[in-house]
Amino acid sequence: MRPGPVDGWLSAEPSRKPTPAPATPDPSPTPVLAAASGGGTALTAEGVSAAIDPLVKSSALGTKVHVAVVDVASGDVLYARNADTMTTPASTTKLLTAAAVLDARGASYRLSTRVVAGDEPGEVVLIGGGDPTLATTKNSLFPGAARLDLLAAQVKKALGGVEPTRLLYDTSLFSGAETAKGWDSGDISFGQVSRVQALMVNAGRIKPIHNEFGGDPRSSDPANAAARAFARLLGVPTSAVRKGKAPTAAASSAPSSAASSAPSGVVPGQQLGVVQSPPMVQLTDWMLEQSDNTAAEALGRQVALADGKPGTFDDATEAILARLTDLGLPADEANLYDASGLSRHNGISPSLLTQLLSLAASGQKPALSAIFGGLPVAGWSGTMHKRFVSPKPNQAGQGVVRGKTGTLSGVNTMAGTLTTKDGRLLVFAIMASGSGGAVTGRAALDTVLVKLASCGC
């Protein structure tokens, strides 16, 4: 991935031949996944309150504000305002989803999209594996994504000289409603999310592009659109594409060498090809950095599936909360209707978010440490690329604050980490609503964090 200015640097032509750097001894490696330790000057609750309380109470931030700030090394709560009360989290919900799926599946887990032989001669079945990053061909939207063109090549090789004549697509991995309670009617039409199905390309987008604001046009039926694209790659007419179910033997069948070399040896349910997503840690990185709602919903279902439950909205949210409970976190301080944060029915307390971030930083649960790699950096990457720009004093937060942002109409939230000017690591969650405008509300939130990082309190 090439966040922020890095894309420009890596895409530019070299202006001159580089000068070889002098050889230096290899440095001694640092501990892997080391826990956050003390460092810098510890802040006091009194000093933090004096510094940020006036800003938190500013009408520019909103009429209802919930805040928690914690010193990671000591565990001390430095500031709390309605910290244990649930409020609308917007996309900070994705932190819970990322932690739960990394705990459930592990950082290296990959999602598989498979093709098996159908029950009828010439019939093949494309089985959705819940991979939201699946691509038709190579593109820059999801680096390293599994691709349908490569899958089609595998199928053609497995079939030998036999041409497929019919394509079924199986989306049974996910079930239930395809939209969540609390989503606005325009969320799909505006391109903020797609219908949640187990088969899609480019997270349901019509074209492989991503816009933070304004949304990306989505297919009305992502699974059908993906299947039709695959049919074209196979040479199957789109009129011969149907939704269906893979033969029951598909779950355990693998192609034998004899079947692969002899078309007559292909049996129903035999696997003809498979492609795999990037590792789960890359999927969560993308989901957090770009705040991809469709990816969040797909990953939320993976938590349910890992626990042997169906891939529905309700099962996903219940499984996420159950994982948080198992991690020793106060899951009763969250009420979820989706995994992305689009639902206005969601409620999460700032305290739950800061406890989750503190646990991830502690090193006690190594799988959770991976969430920090996906947090956007102020003024640098993802949804924070253009944050901390205006007013000018807020620019002091660039490169200092890392956070998962959340935005809904009238709601501005952020939860993440920052390092104070004295080198102390803090975690925070600020959740505000009722601001006069989205731009002024975000700037007011950023001002609180800049003050916190620079106060020396």
Image: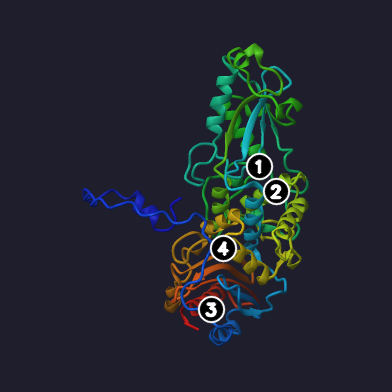
- Helix, strand or loop at mark 4: helix
- Asked if disc 4 and disc 2 are in contact, CB closer than 8 Å, the reply is no
Q: Which residue is mark 1?
A: 130
Badge 3: how crowded within 10 Å, few (<14), some, or many (20+)? some
Badge 2: how crowded within 10 Å, few (<14), some, or many (20+)? many
Q: Which residue is mark 2?
A: 301
Q: Which residue is mark 3?
A: 448
Q: What is the three-letter code of the residue carrying label 1?
A: Gly
Which of discs 1 and 4 lies nearer the camera? The answer is 4
Q: Is residue 291 left or right of residue 245?
A: left
- Residue 394 visible to an observer of this rendering: yes
Q: Image quarter for residue 363?
A: bottom right
Q: What is the three-letter code of the residue carrying label 3?
A: Val
Q: Which residue is mark 4?
A: 361
Which mark is first along the chain, 4 or 3? Answer: 4
- Residue 180 visible to an observer of this rendering: no
- Cα gap from disc 2 to disc 1, whole angstroms: 8 Å
